[in-house]
Amino acid sequence: MNHKGVACGALGAMVDTTAGACAWLYVGTVMVWILASPYPALQDYPEWLYQGHVVAALFKGSPGAAAAFEFARYPIPNSLTQIMLGLVNLVVSPLVAGKIWLCAYLISFMVVLTVIARSVHPAHCGKLLLVLTTTTAVDSGFWNGYINYQVSLLLLSMFVYVWFLQGRQTVAMLGSFALALFFCHAATFVVFVGLLLIAEATRQPQRLIGFPRGKIVAGLLPALCLLLWYTVARRPVSVGAVIAMPGKDIGDSLGAFLAYKGYTIMKQGAFHIFEFPDKTSHLAGLDALYWVGVALNGLFAVLLVAAVLWALWDMYQNRRWHDLRFPLTFAVCTWVAYFGSPQLFLNIANFGERVLVPSLLVLFCLLKVRPVMLVALCMPVLAALPMTMSFLITPHLFAPHAQTTYHRFFTHRPYQFAAKAEFLSTSGATPYLPLNFDSSVLRNRPRGSNLFRPDHLHAEAQRLFQVNTELTAKFPYGADQEP
């Protein structure tokens, strides 16, 4: 008996089980934090939650909501979550609806990722699950509150599993996913369409027309018609100022542009910083720990790129030309789109990142990443998770410390839309606030209510934000208490 081989196998199985358990523990901690908090503080999410409340008010025929807001008269890619939250709002309160939607998202995504990991890498599913969890389900976009985009990643992962890994390919299923992804997010929908077209073009390059491609066209046609309608009918939307990372305007130099692209890949790591309203972070006073987290994300980015390239090289070395054409072409196309896209494209901030994340999800599903690379990827993730989770467990653990260095990188602002969350906690007792983002199914009425006069709006918004800031400083999980 090869005792050394048995011991290595047992150790590998233990590492894999530990990695999978850590992925579920991380998501479980996030869910507990969401349920225990007075509102889901995921940067932009309170704004989308507020819009779901307005959708429900319009469904109910509220005169106040009808005087201040209106529905868009054409299909919008960034609207599925707002409509669903509006429907849930008809049954429960807005804050409860927001928590239900997030918990349903997290549980569904983890189940899908677990199934994918077991299908792609049965012997190393735990490690693959941990990597996919921190790069898709609970990634930088999740903490930024990009809920429509995150739901689109969930739908794309479901599609990849059913269509490519299981081979269940029907026109009805393709059409359903295409419509759902269109109404989630335009960037993921573009990746989805490109994925299908590249798959058909590379797997049967000698056939210009045939039933499989006719099936693809038939399934995509309704969603493509909606995209054309949206493209023709849409109006320019207001987008807030976008701050270039890591510190310079992207147009300043090629070096700054490449640094920004590298930073975007680093953002897929597990280290995240949470900033309080007073501009201090949850690691205030712990600058050394902060830079360790930055280094871990940098290491993860290098390993991430290396894992994909090594998997493609393995297919080349094994002369699997037929299998290599599809993932290689898809990787080249998506990475060209990633590096070629500016920071703001089609009124979508960080468009390149919105293309990068779904492409990584697809490639990790289609490629056989080496187990040693999965182990290497898990190491910076496991080292960074405690620093991220410290905010979820005790948000003000480090509050007494002074902020000696501004922690700029990998920063998220959970209290950015505290005014909207405070409005929702009043059950509509205060006047409506205007939409911060009119890039979804709702629009601020240009005329119709003196509610949105700048003088009144400024005072009300500032009051709500100040109240919430003071309360969160006193009660980390009790901002709904009276001062």
Image: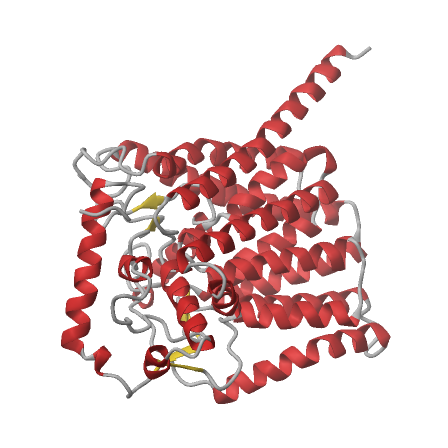
Image quadrant containing the N terminus: top right
Q: As drawn, is 296 to the left or to the right of 67?
A: right
Q: How is the image coloured?
A: secondary structure
Q: Is residue 287 above or below residue 336?
A: above
The residue at 61%/35% (across/down) is 127
Between 366 and 449, the residue placed more toward the observer is 449
The x, y position of residue 276, in whole percent, is 25, 47
- Closest to the observer, 237 or 101: 101
In this rendering, position of residue 174 left or right of residue 226? right
Which percent across, then down, holds residue 60? 45, 75
Q: Residue at x 43, y 35 (%)?
A: 384
Residue 347 image offset from top left, x and y in percent: 41, 74
Count of labels in the image = 0
Q: In percent of the image, x 38 and y 55: which residue is there?
A: 259
The answer to whether 380 appears left or right of 371 in the picture is left
- Front in this rendered view, residue 61 or 101: 61
Q: Is residue 72 above or below residue 263?
A: below
Residue 478 in sight from this viewpoint: yes
Image position of 136 with respect to 36: above or below: below
Q: Note whether 260 is above or below 110 in the view shown.
A: below
Q: Is residue 306 visible in this depiction of the protein?
A: no
Residue 462 coordinates in the image, percent (x, y): 17, 63
